[in-house]
């Protein structure tokens, strides 16, 4: 029986620093330990600040998902005030947020994930010449098309949010700029152009045709566009068998409007969806370089362990729901929202294939949502309500970033922030072990990954890690 240890990292094409220690036995990963090696300290930074400062500071956590952080911070302040945003303000926030998430999915697919299949290691596969032409880093035709399409779509954020990233347009009461009738026309025109890109390049068919796929087989056998090329590669490499996580999913529900969230909230385990109780969330610190005890984020603390004790191996805390690990992300959202193909894929077991399929499904479904939202924009309505932040209070802001469930918890005393805790999607997915020794979702997904003789950075490991689309700067904020 041969065994060895590998330290893989830092990973390229990943936002932030990531190292993973692998224990390898008989050509397969037998255990994995994910380390977020960069501590940043945004939570302590917020202490003592005016609550409204969270709207300026938290978007700086990340340049990829800054609108997600804005939306979560605004929702937390609104929750503390006990008042909802103006309905049209909520609609505008949803549009801004959805554009960022779709752009994130597009970037991940074209620039971060698919580039691995252009590697020389895959030379000789029938699909490799096409992957090489489409997805070679910095040169592939798909990369150039995606960057241009993304830039055009973000024009809506410029019109409505003033800038991207780090817009200050999203507030507890809505958005700071009411779009005009002319803006509405421009939004619709931009979305129509983006639809043409999706239908010509990504799906090679109407968006609705992909969004309405009803079975796992229909998804995995999709034949056209870059989505079809991925499915061909996935079938050849059996990506449906690679990277099985805990098969438990969490979503706070995406894009809260006046009536409901556009993608529903909940948890999925054991083949069914159940209601989510956020009161069951705890952050375990047993393997994190943090001091303190397991707590709910509403009264959590962030106190770095400067001595970095040897029993810990990451700056990332270990969030658990009722003591269990949970996977979060686009695939989790689609499963919990009840999309039939996503549910069928989930019942087969999570995988590299399912996570990427979830993003592709979400791109298609969100395009349709955005078009309908723009039709509902009412320029003459109010886009901002008066939501005064209380001198004392607590609130939570639960949203869905591209990578999954993002929560902000704020505690206000005497007009100042007395406590602020954030659990980012990658904190859930890339958490270390807890006090019971249970590995985090990506640690569990890596077990069984094949490692070839002489591989120091195994391709299988890279596919699995990137299928979760880690953002490590958000992880340890």
Image (spheres, rainbow, N blue to C red):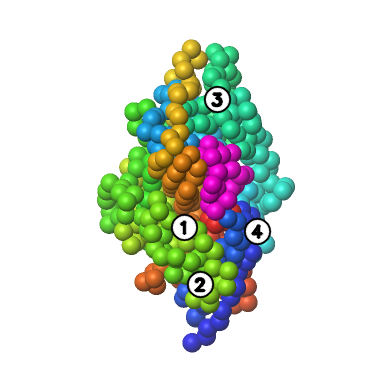
Residue at screen point 56% across, 30% down = 169
Label 3 vs 1, first from the N-terminus? 3
> Which residues fall within the magenta stretch?
43-71
Residue occupying the far front of the picture: 414
Q: Are marks 2 and 3 in contact (CB under 8 Å)?
A: no
Secondary structure predominantly adopted by residues drawn in magenta: helix
Residue 247 is situated, as x and y percent measured from the top left of the image, at: 36, 58
Residue 144 is situated, as x and y percent measured from the top left of the image, at: 68, 40
Label 2 vs 4, first from the N-terminus? 4
Q: Are marks 3 and 1 in contact (CB under 8 Å)?
A: no
Dot 4: what SS? Answer: loop
Q: Which residue is mark 4?
A: 12
- Mark nearer the viewer, 3 or 1: 1
- Which circle marks residue 312 in the picture? 2
- Mark nearer the viewer, 3 or 4: 3
Residue at screen point 40% across, 41% down = 393
- Residue 53 occupies which quadrant of the picture? top right
Q: Which residue is mark 1?
A: 301
Residue at screen point 53% across, 52% down = 43
Gap between marks 3 and 4, in whole Å?
A: 37 Å
Left or right, residue 91 beside residue 344: right
Q: Is residue 340 at least partly visible in the picture?
A: no
Callout 2 crowding tier (Cα within 10 Å): few <14, some 14–19, many ≥20: some
- Mark nearer the viewer, 2 or 4: 2
Q: Which residue is mark 3?
A: 176
Residue 137 is situated, as x and y percent measured from the top left of the image, at: 69, 51
- Mark nearer the viewer, 1 or 2: 1
Q: Is 119 in front, or is 379?
A: 379
């Amino acid at each position: 029986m041969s065994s060895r240890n590998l330290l893989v990292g830092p990973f390229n094409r990943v936002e932030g620093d990531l190292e993973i220690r692998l224990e390898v036995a008989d050509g397969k990963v037998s255990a994995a330990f994910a380390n977020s090696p960069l501590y940043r300290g945004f939570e302590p930074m917020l202490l003592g600040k005016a609550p409204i400062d969270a709207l300026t500071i938290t978007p700086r956590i990340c340049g990829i998902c800054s609108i997600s952080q804005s939306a979560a911070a605004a929702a937390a302040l609104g929750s503390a005030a006990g008042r909802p945003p103006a309905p049209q303000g909520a609609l505008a926030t949803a549009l801004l947020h959805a554009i960022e998430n779709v752009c994130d999915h597009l970037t991940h697919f074209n620039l971060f994930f698919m580039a691995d299949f252009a590697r020389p290691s895959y030379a000789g596969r029938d699909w490799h010449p096409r992957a090489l032409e489409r997805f070679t880093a910095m040169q592939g035709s798909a990369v150039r098309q995606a960057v241009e399409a993304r830039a055009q779509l973000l024009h809506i954020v410029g019109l409505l949010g003033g800038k991207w990233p780090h817009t200050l347009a999203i507030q507890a009461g809505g958005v700071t700029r009411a779009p005009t009738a002319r803006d509405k026309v421009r939004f619709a025109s931009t979305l129509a152009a983006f639809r043409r890109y999706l239908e010509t390049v990504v799906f090679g068919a109407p968006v609705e045709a992909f969004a309405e796929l009803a079975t796992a087989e229909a998804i995995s056998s999709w034949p056209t566009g870059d989505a079809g090329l991925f499915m061909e590669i996935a079938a050849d490499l059996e990506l449906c068998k690679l990277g099985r996580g805990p098969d438990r999913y969490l979503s706070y529900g995406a894009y809260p409007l006046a009536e409901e969230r556009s993608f529903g909230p909940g948890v999925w385990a054991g083949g069914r969806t159940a209601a989510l109780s956020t009161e069951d969330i705890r952050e375990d610190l047993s393997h994190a370089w943090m001091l303190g005890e397991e707590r709910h984020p509403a009264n959590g603390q962030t106190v770095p362990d400067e001595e970095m004790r040897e029993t810990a191996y990451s700056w990332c805390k270990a969030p658990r729901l009722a003591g269990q690990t949970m996977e979060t992300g686009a695939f989790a959202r689609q499963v919990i929202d009840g999309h039939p193909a996503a549910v069928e894929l989930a019942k087969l077991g999570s995988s590299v294939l399912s996570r990427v399929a979830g993003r592709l499904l979400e791109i298609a479904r969100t395009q349709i949502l955005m078009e309908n939202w723009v039709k509902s924009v009412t320029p003459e309505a109010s886009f901002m309500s008066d939501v005064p932040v209380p001198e004392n209070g607590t609130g939570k802001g639960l949203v869905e970033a591209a990578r999954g469930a993002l929560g902000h918890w704020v505690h206000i005393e005497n007009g100042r922030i007395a406590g602020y805790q954030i659990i980012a999607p990658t904190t859930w997915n890339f958490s270390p072990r807890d006090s019971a020794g249970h590995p985090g979702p990506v640690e569990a997904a890596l077990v069984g990954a094949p490692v070839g003789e002489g591989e120091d950075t195994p391709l299988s490991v890279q596919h699995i890690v990137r299928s979760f689309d880690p953002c490590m700067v958000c992880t340890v904020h």
